[in-house]
Image: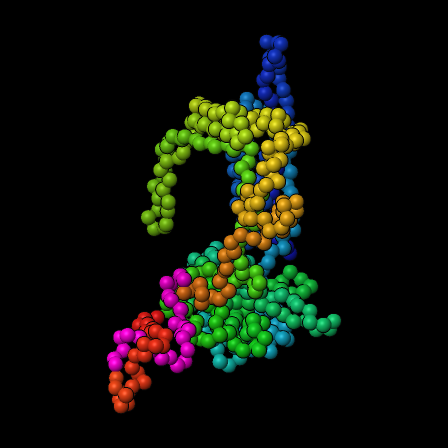
């Protein structure tokens, strides 16, 4: 099996001859039936680092288990002979990182990435070490990081590194978390191409003490990939997020960006980061309203079903106390079911079915399929024309002034109301829920923080009410006295903490 140059994806499919003894309905004499059955395995990735004995043993166990389960399913089939084994092989080209790839010029000029010039398959390792041990002089030289080459734990991880193995790397190195971003080409003109940062291609589940942002590069004419360290995320994506190109500050947990570093620090300090990327609606699309009015009608038939199960104990081996483990003590085994078919337009067509016994799930599926097929053939396969409205129904229809679905009044003449309302009004009317368009709004609600106080009174205000003192004409503060012939006015004072 040649996996020296390219890894493979393979699976095994075993073909065998099985026999079963059957009886004809009009004859008591048994006859033997012979058929060819096959059992296949899932595709497995085979690389030069994997043991072939291990792979063959895995496929053998899978096919043996499937064959034994087939014979034990009360099917009556018995193995007669093995016919042949089919091996399917596919060329496997995973997203992986290998040798050095230079940065595109427009990304390189931002001076936000450290791209270590390695000539082995361990660019992921050198990118992580360049982040953990940053070098001021020639940070792209691998010699700066060779003294720390044995610092990271790469147990059960093969090189070149694949994205799916980063979670295993984080598990081996509990003090490190990784985010991986990619590049996307965006043509500016016929001769110029701009690169944008996209992703994350991989997003850590929890931000650790040593968090590392990596950029994944792909070679144009090969399957090679390359990891490099994003030293300054703000500088890298600033010109992409806003037009003026000023720096932005991104939270590594939820990927929300801020215009000031102090806002990011406050965001992390007060625990606003929920480790979930916040996607805000576009301007003009920040309204949520109910539109599926056709779903307001009850369906003709509704089926309600329920199962009952017995909890059978499970035998378990003694767990290893040095590792995390889960003990399964019981398993649910269904022994009965019931389902109720409710007819909306004629209650006499409603019925209930119950069953208790073996093969509960198989019987449930068979009965349900038969009942649904019967209902479809009898009531839905042939479209019956609508009966003409009676004079009473027609008068009621013509006198209607509101929609019976959304209860909104018709806005046009009676003869046109139904058509216009159904085509337009249902899509534009009803309650609209305005969505948040600013991350700070989300935080205000989630943290129960009230916004700032807005002064809605005039800049200069004057009171005039009966609680003001009566002053003499010669008093210098006579203008503050109460004037009964003028309108009564009060000054509002609000004492509140934000």
Instruction: Give x and y (percent) for residue 392.
Output: 59, 32
- Left or right: 158 as drawn, with respect to 269: right
**Magenta residues, start to end:** 445-470
Whether 74 is drawn above or below 124: the answer is above
Instruction: Give x and y (percent) for residue 318.
Output: 34, 41
Task: Name the quadrant of the C terminus.
Answer: bottom left
Whether 41 is drawn above or below 342: the answer is below
Residue 95 sits in quarter: bottom right
Residue 30 sits in quarter: top right
Q: Residue at x 36, y 42 (%)?
A: 327
Q: Residue at x 29, y 86 (%)?
A: 478
Frontmost residue, 408 versus 163: 408
Q: Residue furthest right?
A: 190
Q: How is the image coloured?
A: rainbow
Counting every numbered tag in the picture gives 0
Whether 71 is drawn above or below 196: the answer is above
Q: Residue at x 65, y 71 (%)?
A: 194
Answer whether residue 452 is magenta in the image: yes
Instruction: Give x and y (percent) for residue 464.
Output: 33, 77
Frontmost residue, 416 versus 156: 416
- Left or right: 252 as drawn, with respect to 115: left
Confirm whether residue 99 shows in the render.
no
Q: Main secondary structure of the magenta part?
A: loop
Answer whether residue 87 is magenta in the image: no
Confirm whether residue 92 shows in the render.
yes
Residue 193 sits in quarter: bottom right
Instruction: Give x and y (percent) for residue 361.
Output: 49, 29
Q: Residue furthest front?
A: 485
């Amino acid at each position: 099996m040649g996996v020296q140059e390219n890894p493979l994806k393979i699976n095994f499919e075993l073909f065998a001859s099985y026999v079963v003894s059957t009886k004809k309905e009009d004859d008591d004499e048994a006859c033997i039936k012979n058929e060819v059955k096959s059992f296949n395995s899932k595709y497995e990735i085979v690389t030069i680092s994997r043991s072939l004995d291990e792979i063959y043993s895995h496929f053998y166990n899978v096919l043996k288990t499937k064959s034994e389960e087939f014979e034990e399913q009360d099917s009556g089939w018995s193995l007669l002979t093995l016919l042949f084994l089919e091996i399917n092989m596919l060329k496997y080209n995973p997203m992986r990182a290998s040798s050095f790839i230079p940065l595109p010029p427009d990304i390189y000029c931002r001076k936000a990435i450290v791209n270590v010039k390695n000539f082995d398959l361990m660019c992921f390792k050198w990118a992580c070490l360049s982040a953990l041990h940053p070098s001021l002089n020639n940070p792209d030289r691998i010699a700066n990081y060779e003294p720390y080459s044995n610092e990271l734990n790469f147990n059960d991880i093969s090189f070149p590194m694949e994205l799916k193995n980063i979670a295993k790397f984080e598990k081996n190195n509990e003090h490190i978390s990784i985010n991986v971003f990619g590049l996307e080409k965006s043509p500016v003109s016929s001769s110029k191409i701009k690169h944008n940062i996209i992703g994350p291609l991989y997003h850590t589940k929890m931000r650790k003490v040593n968090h590392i942002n990596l950029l994944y590069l792909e070679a144009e004419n090969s399957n090679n990939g390359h990891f490099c360290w994003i030293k300054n995320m703000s500088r890298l994506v600033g010109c992409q997020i806003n037009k003026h190109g000023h720096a932005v500050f991104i939270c590594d947990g939820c990927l929300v960006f801020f215009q000031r570093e102090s806002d990011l620090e406050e965001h992390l300090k007060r625990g606003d980061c929920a480790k979930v990327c916040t996607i805000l609606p576009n301007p003009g699309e920040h309204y949520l309203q109910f539109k599926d009015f056709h779903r307001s009608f009850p369906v003709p038939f509704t089926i309600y079903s329920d199962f009952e199960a017995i909890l059978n104990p499970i035998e378990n081996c003694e767990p290893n106390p040095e590792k995390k483990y889960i003990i399964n003590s019981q398993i649910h085994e269904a022994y009965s079911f019931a389902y109720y078919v409710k007819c909306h337009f004629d209650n006499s067509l409603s019925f209930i079915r119950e069953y208790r016994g073996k093969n509960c799930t198989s019987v449930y599926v068979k009965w349900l399929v038969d009942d649904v097929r019967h209902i479809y053939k009898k009531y839905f396969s042939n479209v019956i024309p609508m009966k003409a409205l009676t004079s009473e129904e027609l008068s009621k229809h013509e006198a209607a002034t509101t929609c019976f679905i959304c209860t909104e009044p018709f806005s046009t003449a009676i003869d046109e109301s139904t058509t216009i309302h159904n085509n337009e009004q249902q899509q534009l009317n009803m309650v609209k829920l305005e969505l948040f368009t600013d991350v700070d709004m989300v935080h205000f609600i989630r943290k129960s923080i009230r916004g700032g106080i807005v002064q809605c009174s005039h800049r200069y205000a004057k009171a005039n009410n009966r609680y003001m003192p009566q002053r003499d004409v010669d008093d210098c503060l006579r203008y503050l006295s109460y004037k009964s012939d003028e309108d009564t006015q009060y000054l509002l004072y609000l004492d509140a903490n934000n």
